[in-house]
Image (spheres, rainbow, N blue to C red):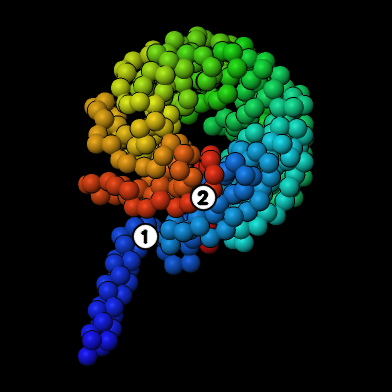
Amino acid sequence: MKPFRNFRVIFVVVVLLVGGIAELWREHRPSFLRPGLKLYAYVTNASGSLAVVDLVRLNTVARVDVGQHPSGLRAHPTRAEIWGTSAYGGYVWVMDARTSQVSARITVGPLPYAVDFSLDGTKAYTTSSGSDTLLTIDCASRTVLGRAKTGAEPVLARVTPDGKSVLVVNRRGGSLGIHDATTLAELARVSVVAEPEDVAVLPDGSVAFVLSRTEGRISVVDLKRRVLLTNLQLAGRPTQMILKPDGGELYVISPESHGLQAVNAWTHEVGDYVLLGSAPTYGLLSPDSSELFVSDNAADRIAPVDIYNRKVGRPILAGRGPGVLAFDSKERPSLLLVVNQGSGDLAVIRISTDNPGLLTMIPVGDNPQELAIKLFK
């Protein structure tokens, strides 16, 4: 009788376990995910590979070699593809999301770091910082359509909201290049803060904000008149700036100052300061702009910030060294994804409840860096 009794116990445990897993799967499965659709996360790491994570089954389904020093990870806006660069390989790579295989490597020159797309998704823009060149690529044929000279060490190309211009951040040149999106001709070059690395543009395309991670200032550039308006003094050197979709405010995160500053994007005045924690590094604004989730790289947690009231909510635990963040959906997110650089995993946090919390952590490789999300058939 004893073996039979043990069998019954094991059977009950297995049933409960399967039921629990099924219930967990139903709870975290995004409501917008219809049958036939797939929702994947993509994470680059120091080994030159890309981890492909199924966000429904919550496991890593593939690891793809994309080349040395991968960066510029982007999901294509209209095609079932993931794009990125291999800085040391000197090429832009394209991965088919349906097969998780690299379908193209497009040689662009030494040290490309970023990729951006035209509004219709037919063209891609990148830079070769080693040869001071801006390039445009046909996304269908994978061919380079044009090249143009830039300032010294262009590290980023960003398409303006109207799609007519491409802004090039020249790091060593300390300038912002304004190029025609069709011909790539440089229309103007504006001096900005030293060693700039990022740019954010107002929705009407009138003003650009340029960030340097080596200086406690951001530059404000009038894109219509193509002149520098001012350099705004910050409380500390920034790591990221986040612009509200309506263009009303710019949020600047600084580990050095342990918080974030709100900048009035229309009057260019530095306003409220919010203390966040030990080393706030990256942030992600909710689709309705009411809440900002900020990763604290030193405290191993996520700080939710009530944007309207400037209040910090209860911290959410993540893995070691949380970095960049992304939502599972741009409209009604239920999950917050966080790359943990210290523990080498992707934290999956449920935010669609009154009590947000860590759901699981999925291993993705040593020193993961960038994150992209793709929904496709």
Secondary structure beneath label 2: loop
Q: Which label belongs to residue 137?
A: none
Task: Give the residue pinned by disc 1.
Answer: 29
Residue at label 2? Answer: 364
Question: Residue at (29%, 78%) from the top-left corner?
Answer: 10
Observer able to see residue 244: no
Residue pictured at 35% horizontal, 22% vertical: 259
Is residue 321 found left or right of 119 in the rendered image?
Answer: left
The residue under the point 39% across, 13% down is 235
Q: Is residue 54 above or below residue 128?
A: below
The disc labelled 2 sits on which kind of residue?
Val
For this rendering, which residue is in front, 266 or 128?
A: 128
| Label 1: element kind | loop
Relative image position of residue 180 (x, y in whole percent):
68, 27
Vertical position of residue 155 compared to residue 367: above or below: above
* Label 2 crowd bin: few (<14), some (14–19), many (20+), radius 10 Å: many
Regarding residue 319, the answer to whether it shows in the image is yes
Mark closer to the observer (1, 2): 2
